[in-house]
Image (cartoon, helix red, strand yellow):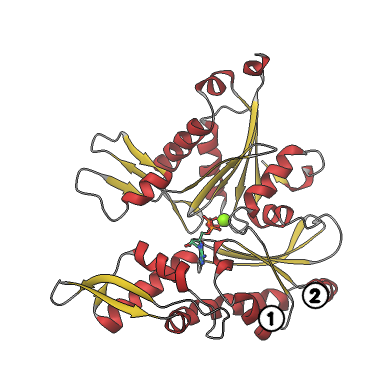
Amino acid sequence: MFNIFKHQSFSIDLGNNNTLLASADKMLLAQPSYIVFNANHSVKAVGEEAFEMFEKTHDELTPVKPLKGGVIADFNSASTMLREMVNRAYSTRSFLSGFDHIISGVPYYTTEVERRALRDALEQFNPRKRSLLFEPLAAAIGMDLNIQEPDGKLVIDIGGGITEIVIISLSGVAAFQSLKVAGDTFDMNIQDYFRRNYNMAIGLKTAEQIKIKIGAACEAIDPVPEMVSVKGKDMVTGIPITRRIDHREVAFILEKSIASIERSIVQTLETCPPELAADIYQNGMYLTGGGSLLRGIKDRFEKNIKLPVHLDEHPLSSVSRGVARVLANPKKFSGVLID
Ligand SMILES: Nc1ncnc2c1ncn2[C@@H]1O[C@H](COP(=O)(O)OP(=O)(O)OP(=O)(O)O)[C@@H](O)[C@H]1O
Ligand SMILES: [Mg+2]
């Protein structure tokens, strides 16, 4: 009864591929970052429903993926998508009584303009307080790492649009690399490969499914997943065709992209102060983000970089878990919040 007077606070991970909303103590929503508009600009669908429609729409509908490379690429669509999602998570009453504190994750390597777009998108909720939190720091907190101590931690978040590699100590970032090679790149690699090698056009969603079902970061994996049948279109005749593919071929397709992530990890270690490097040799690296679900990635990095790899058990929600934890205890984490 008195609840209606309580101002709500929530946390956001506005990811390139997935948007997560959470309150201080529970997950409220996790949906793909997609929106579809009708011809009159009204919203046809958001999240899962919009993602299902992707690459299957007609002229009357405009599908939009509002984030690219981990940042807002289409401001109006991103704001509308966020509003629709917050609407779903909360009643209209919350909108009327206003929000208290909103914290959103933001990639570490972003420009002031990109951050301003995110802040502006949050302004529509009229929060009393609004803060941003660097996503790799949030991911570390979400993985239960103590980021406040003077002990170097190497955190790697392979998301959909970007991979961020950071060395954290004393609540700050001592060295980092950010690259636009991540889940979306893997999907495009697969799509390109089919086009070039088999004259076969496949959709991005099909490419993503191949990656999820049999994607691998190296050939030697256990257990070995079953081959999959890929449906597409012959680019010469236009006729629908299928082709079977196994995980070794996918490992070959993804090789260049995975190798570039690997090189960036090594470069981050090279630029890191020696004391922190010593900590990391002890602690190893912490891998999160949807891309860390690729089969064999732990073994591959351990073999090539010669450091222990800790895989996050729930890599799609580490940032959201971390932001929510900061929301629950903003005083404790005041050092990591930015305006
Ligand atoms: N089992 C899987 N194997 C490989 N990749 C996967 C798997 N499950 C999800 N992914 C990929 O993970 C990516 C999404 O990860 P995540 O939600 O961490 O990204 P994001 O936070 O939306 O993006 P960013 O951090 O770049 O803003 C997508 O590219 C998706 O295809
Ligand atoms: Mg992310």
Mark positioned earlier in the residue sequence (2 or 1): 2
Residue type beneath disc 1: Glu
Is residue 110 among what the camera can see?
no
How far apart are labels 2 and 1 at the CA level? Answer: 16 Å
Image quarter where ligand 2 lies: bottom right
User: Tag 2's secondary structure?
Assistant: helix
Residue occupying the far left of the picture = 237
Q: Closer to the camera, 270 or 54?
A: 54
Q: Classify mark 1: residues with Cα within 10 Å, few (<14), some (14-19) or many (20+).
A: some
Q: Is residue 199 above or below residue 317?
A: below
Count neighbours of disc 2 (C-alpha within 10 A) and say few if under 14, some if 14 to 19, many if 20 or more. Answer: many
User: Which residue type carries mark 2?
Assistant: Ala
For label 1, the residue is: 302
Q: Position of residue 239 (x, y in %)?
A: 15, 72
Q: What residue is disc 2 on?
A: 277
Where residue 228 appears, x then y in whole percent?
A: 38, 74
Residue at the (68%, 43%) spot, across then down: 324
Residue 333 in the image, given as x and y percentages of width and height: 78, 44
Left or right for 145, reference 314: right
Viewer-closest of 218 and 61: 218
Q: Quadrant of the N terminus?
A: top right
User: Assess mark 2: CB under 8 A from ligand 1?
Assistant: no
Residue at 76 percent of width and 73 percent of height: 284
The structure residue drawn at horizontal position 42% and vertical position 49%, both measured from the top left corner, is: 66
Q: Residue at x 59, y 22 (%)?
A: 98
